[in-house]
Image (cartoon, rainbow, N blue to C red):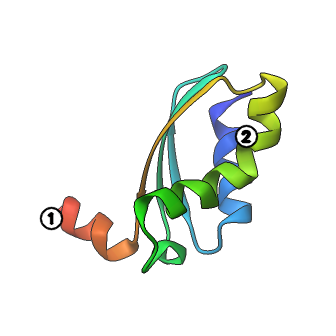
Amino acid sequence: MLANQVKALLEEKIQGSEVLVEGEGCDFRLTIISDEFQGAMPVKRQQMVYQHLNGMIASGEIHAVTMVTLTQSEWQQRNS
């Protein structure tokens, strides 16, 4: 799986998201920015992402995922 494929998939599935992907092959580091995460606890946010990746994880297409999930305001605070 290519980084741009993971990016496209998640940006399509998570409304209004921006996805930054590092890594190739089966090991990815993701930063997902979306206001869909507003009010959700960190575990719930991860579940919202994993629901779109579980099939690829189960098939072995993706082996390892590390992620940071942020709302737009959290992203802005982090980068100001």
Q: CA distance from mark 1 to mark 2?
A: 29 Å
Indicate left or right for 15 with 40 as reference.
right
Q: Would you call the spot at circle 1 few (<14 residues within 10 Å), some (14-19), or many (20 or more)?
A: few
Residue 67, numbered circle: none
Please give the name of the residue rendered at 21% of the width and 60% of the height, measured from the top-left corner: 78
From what the image shows, is residue 80 above or below residue 60? below
- The front one of 55 and 70 is 55
Indicate left or right for 8 with 32 as reference.
right
Q: Residue furthest left?
A: 80
Where residue 19 appears, as percent x and y from the top left, is: 53, 53
Q: Would you call the spot at circle 2 few (<14 residues within 10 Å), some (14-19), or many (20 or more)?
A: few
Please give the name of the residue rendered at 20% of the width and 68% of the height, measured from the top-left corner: 77
Residue type beneath disc 2? Gln
From what the image shows, is residue 25 above or below residue 65? above
Q: Which quadrant of the figure contains the N terminus?
A: top right
Indicate left or right for 21 with 78 as reference.
right
Where residue 43 appears, as percent x and y from the top left, is: 48, 57
- The front one of 70 and 57 is 57
Q: Which residue is mark 1?
A: 80
Residue type beneath disc 1? Ser
Total numbered labels: 2
Asked which secondary structure carries label 2, the reply is helix
Where residue 62 appears, as percent x and y from the top left, is: 70, 27
Q: Which residue is mark 2?
A: 5
Please give the name of the residue rendered at 73% of the width and 63% of the height, measured from the top-left corner: 13
Where residue 54 appears, as percent x and y from the top left, is: 75, 42
Dot 1 and dot 2 residues touching (CB under 8 Å): no
Q: Give the mark, 1 or 2, whose residue is nearer the N terminus.
A: 2
Asked which secondary structure carries label 1, the reply is loop
